[in-house]
Image (tube, rainbow, N blue to C red):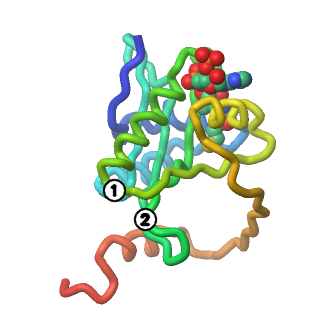
Amino acid sequence: MVVLRPARESDAAAISQLIAQLGYSADSTATQQRLGRLLPREDHLVLVAVTKGETVCGWLHAHAADALESGFRVEIVGLVVGREMKRKGVGKALVEQAERWAKALGAEAIVVRSNIKRTESHAFYPALGYTESKTQKVYRKQLSATGLKASKQASPPLGGSA
Ligand SMILES: CC(C)(COP(=O)(O)OP(=O)(O)OC[C@H]1O[C@@H](n2cnc3c(N)ncnc32)[C@H](O)[C@@H]1OP(=O)(O)O)[C@@H](O)C(=O)NCCC(=O)NCCS
């Protein structure tokens, strides 16, 4: 049996191993630091799926954000199910939990961008009722900062009284 629970910093190594299955380099220390920043935040949801033996077999990260052009929505920014546990309903359970969270927050929609090469996901999301809305190119420019400063500044509201 698989159960879902909020991720903990101690899940970093297991989450990194699943990230590595996608072909990305996955530094467990960096994952732990990111979890440390994300877990206290109410606009982020990080879930893990664990087997009876407490092995992490899947994870999902979702982010709620307000956008001027598209309104308040939740985006699934990461989802991986371990290769031994695929096609057992784990991915579906993680996404359905993210949908409940999104509804509870009052999000207008839940969206996900998935690389064209992730063939499994292009069967998975339509099976869960998601429809393809557009095709994009993603542009990237490497900056020298680590990102730590930016994410610390994002928490207090801009122009707030604090
Ligand atoms: C996509 C992914 C998360 C699916 O997880 P999963 O736990 O295997 O999916 P589920 O068992 O919940 O599948 C639910 C339904 O989706 C569809 N589906 C899932 N994987 C599929 C596949 N490889 N081929 C065809 N249909 C598939 C099926 O309809 C399935 O129901 P069924 O098994 O009763 O037929 C998993 O394959 C994965 O981690 N892939 C690599 C990473 C990735 O692509 N992540 C998403 C990018 S955001």
Q: Residue 132: horizontal and vertical position, in percent?
A: 70, 48
Quadrant the C terminus occupies: bottom left
Q: Residues within 10 Å of mark 1 (few under 14, many from 20)?
A: few
User: Taking 158 as reference, is 98 above or below it?
Assistant: above
Identify the mark at residue 72; answer none if there is no mark. 2
Disc marking residue 60: none
Give x and y (percent) for residue 7: 37, 38
Q: Residue furthest left?
A: 161
Q: Residue at x 55, y 75 (%)?
A: 69
Mark-to-mark CA distance, 2 and 1: 8 Å
Front-most of 57 and 102?
A: 102
Q: Quadrant of ligand 1?
A: top right
For the residue labelled by badge 1, is the local secondary structure a helix, a strand or a loop? loop
**Pointers 2 and 1 in contact (C-beta within 8 Å):** yes
Return the mark for residue 106: 1
Q: Earlier in the sequence, mark 2 or mark 1?
A: 2
Q: Position of residue 125 (x, y in %)?
A: 63, 36
Residue sitting at 29 percent across and 76 percent down?
156
Query: Vertical placement of 134 versus 57: above or below?
Result: below
Q: Quadrant of residue 55?
A: top left
Identity, as a three-letter code, of the amino acid under mark 2: Phe
Residue at x 35% of width, y 45% of height: 101
Q: What is the quadrant of residue 140 in the picture?
A: bottom right
Residue 29 located left or right of residue 101: right
Frontmost residue, 11 versus 49: 49
Instruction: Rate crowding at label 2 as few (under 14), some (14 to 19) or many (20 or more) other CA atoms within 10 Å.
Output: some
Question: Which quadrant is the N terminus positioned in?
Answer: top left
**Disc 2, SS:** strand
Q: Is mark 1 within 8 Å of ligand 1?
A: no
